[in-house]
Image (cartoon, helix red, strand yellow):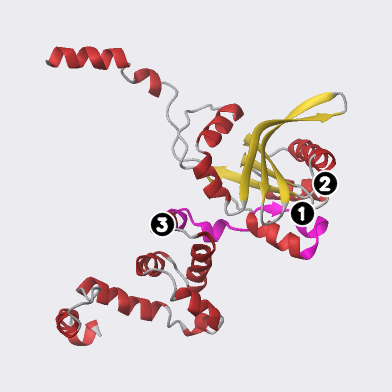
Amino acid sequence: MEAKWGSKIFATMSSELKDAFPGMEGFSVTNLKYMKRFFQFYSNDDEIGQQPVDQFEKLYSIPWGHQILLITKCKTVREAFFYVNKILENGWSRAVLLNFLETGLFERQGKAITNFSRLLPDTQSDLAKETLKDPYNFDFLSLSEGYHESELEDALTSNITKFLLELGQGFAFVGRQVPIQIGEKEVYMDLLFYHIVLRCYVVVELKVSEFDPAFTGQLGVYVAAVNHQKKKETDNETLGLLICKTKDDIMAEYSLEASSQPIGISEYKLKDLLPNDYVSSLPTIAEIEESLKNLQ
């Protein structure tokens, strides 16, 4: 259209539509261009044929502002419909949608290495696997170089709302450093959640180093202990989630083959770390107050 008639066609259409429908909004030149782009994006014959009719009914039920983000940020129709379903399931605002688009949720969802298919019933296995991500995006944290596991845990629990949003729908926070008695020893689980959709506990262990097979054994013991001591008859089997700084996928897969507990293994990503001397280089409150006095 633009190649044939030039960009003036949009200005003409905008003016005529505003005259014809004086009480309606949405006929700006920019919006008309987005309408054209919407039509072109969802006219991909190769992908459209793979989408059931009810998917398009869902598509037309989300706000136009969300639609613009989808057609400008998504590479394929399949990716767009993935986010359409998430919007409707979770009631995402446009800001939340933009966050997940920019962090590539479509590419990360369901990508954790797990042994769920071997240890869980098919229906639960599929849902549990889709619940986990790889990697987890912790860009909302500010940590300095050389941080420890306790500092990562502190930061995540201090930002629990953002952490729960990154974990996904259904996670309910139970506690951190949750004690559990194993024989004569009391041990502490990093983080404990209950998933209200999967109807099970989820034990999360954080590691700020490369994956080690010993981590799987430790987490497996915690999962078994929760099954014995906290799990109710109405609950499904407890899941374990190990989130490491980095992992060798083959090593992780072999480790899970040797485990008798359902566990997922993922990495996490952080934004640029602050240098260790960053805080010490900032002026203190007293120094700021003194500087303000000198300006008066």
Q: Is residue 279 left or right of residue 190?
A: left
Check the picture and name the quadrant holding the C terminus.
Answer: top left
> In the rendered image, which quarter is residue 185 located in?
top right
Amino acid type of the residue tagged 1 in the rendering: Asn
Give the secondary structure at mark 2.
Answer: loop
Single out the residue that lies furthest toward the bottom.
4
Q: Mark 3 against mark 2, which lies toward the viewer?
A: 3
Circle 1 packing at 10 Å, graded few (<14), some (14-19), many (20+), is many
Q: Position of residue 99 (x, y in %)?
A: 43, 53
> Residue at (82%, 38%) from the top-left corner?
229
Compute the Cα span from label 2 to label 1.
Answer: 8 Å
* Residue type, numbered disc 3: Leu
In whole angstroms, how far apart are the C-alphas of marks 3 and 2? 38 Å
Residue 125 vertical placement versus 23 (above, below): above
The residue at which mark 3 appears reads as 98
Mark 2 Cα shell of 10 Å, populated few (<14), some (14-19), many (≥20): some
Q: Residue furthest left?
A: 296
Span highlighted in magenta in the image: 97-122
Is residue 149 visible in the rendered image? The answer is: yes
Disc ID at residue 259: 2
228 to 254, vertically: above or below: above
**Image position, residue 52 (x, y; %):** 56, 81
Amino acid on which the number 2 mark rests in the picture: Ser
Q: Residue at point 65% right, 44% down?
A: 247
In the rendered image of this protein, does residue 51 appear above or below residue 288? below
Asked whether the beta carbons under mark 3 and mark 2 sit within 8 Å of each other, the answer is no
- SS of the residue under disc 3: helix
Q: Which mark is residue 115?
A: 1
Apparent side of residue 254 relative to residue 59 in the rendered image (left or right): right
Helix, strand or loop at label 1? It is loop
Residue 248 in sight: no
Q: Dot 3, crowdedness within 10 Å: few (<14), some or many (≥20)?
A: some
